[in-house]
Amino acid sequence: MTDDPQLHVDGVPVARYVLDPDLDATHGPRPYLHPVRTLAGTVVTDALPADHVWHLGASLAVQDVDGTNLWGGRTYVRDTGYTWRDDHGRIAHTGWDERYADRLAHRLQWRDRDGRVLLTEHRRLAAAPLPGPAGGWLLDVAYTLTAPAEHDVVLGSPATNGRPGGAGYGGFFWRAVSTDPADTFTATAEGEEKVNGSAEEWVALTGTADGAAYTLVFCGLAEEDRWFVRTAMYPGVCAAFAFARTRSIPAGGSRSGRHRIAVLDGHPDRATVAALADRLATGG
């Protein structure tokens, strides 16, 4: 039995990190954070929801990695649509580098259905209190994906495989939970239709869970990446690697990312959220 660690902020457990979930291959088994909680205890992630059972809290996953589905669910096939295929891989924890109450760092392998290593990864997760009027806490997620020396690795999405409608998901994805309709906004746009596919410095998602309001603020979109955002079908935010076109990691090369997510109780006013987001986006 794998020992799943928890992240703490000032002694308060705020996130469980599930290292080796015992899941069917079609769910895209991978490490994920769930439950993630506000400091007041409101759960702000969802895992194995009935509408998309392969959505696993907050995790890193891509639907098309050199033809392997590491996201879970059906694979989008050009001119055919979503299709069940025997193409699911696994993202596996292989060893610890750091393990403390407020930070975790480990090594992983992205593997195809036969266990062949597609990518290696180093990942770091850290939790810290957020000073300021909004309060809350900060989740800092950093990772480096490295391709094998022998060949490039191509990352794709349903959109790059032909699906219309801005379905360019795949990357760092946060499946949220909300009993009331969630809302999303940036510094210049509001609502799923306008925020999805944007390249804003930050995205906020507001919702209600366990009878309590919460707000999430996401920063750290890499160059050429886009925000994939849903609020109507389900609440979720993804820093998408291949929103409109495939992306390649060159042979022996790496792709790094870092995302900073503010987890807040309540619905602070827009000015407070914008000020916090600007601070996070500049590393403050």
Image: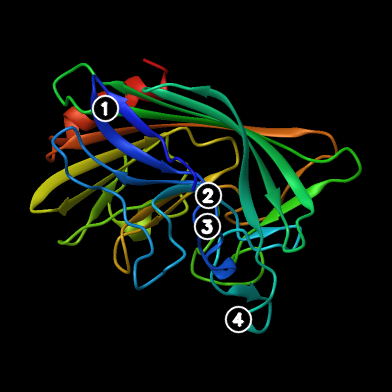
Quarter of the image that includes the C terminus: top left
Q: Which mark is residue 20?
A: 2
Q: Which mark is residue 32?
A: none
Please identify the residue farthest to the bottom as the structure is shown.
80
Left or right placement of residue 220 versus residue 194 in this view: right
Residue 124 location in percent, x, y? 52, 28
Q: Which mark is residue 137?
A: 1
Q: Amino acid at mark 2?
A: Asp
| Structural distance between the alpha carbons of marks 1 and 2 | 26 Å
Mark nearest the camera among 3 and 2 is 2
Going 72% across and 63% down the picture, which residue do you hit? Answer: 113
Classify 10 Å Cα crowding around label 3: few (below 14), some (14-19), many (20 and above): many
Mark nearest the camera among 3 and 1 is 1
Please identify the residue farthest to the right as the structure is shown.
150
248 and 21: which is toward the camera: 21
Question: Does label 1 or label 2 sit earlier along the sequence?
Answer: 2
Question: Does label 3 or label 2 sit earlier along the sequence?
Answer: 2
Whether residue 152 can be seen here: yes
Question: Does label 4 or label 3 sit earlier along the sequence?
Answer: 4
Q: Which secondary structure lies at badge 1? A: strand
Classify 10 Å Cα crowding around label 2: few (below 14), some (14-19), many (20 and above): some
Q: Amino acid at mark 3?
A: Tyr
| Structural distance between the alpha carbons of marks 3 and 1 | 26 Å
Question: Does label 1 or label 4 sit earlier along the sequence?
Answer: 4
Going 71% across and 62% down the picture, which residue do you hit? Answer: 68
Residue pointed to by mark 4: 81
Task: Determine which quarter of the picture holds residue 119.
Answer: top right
Q: Total label count?
A: 4
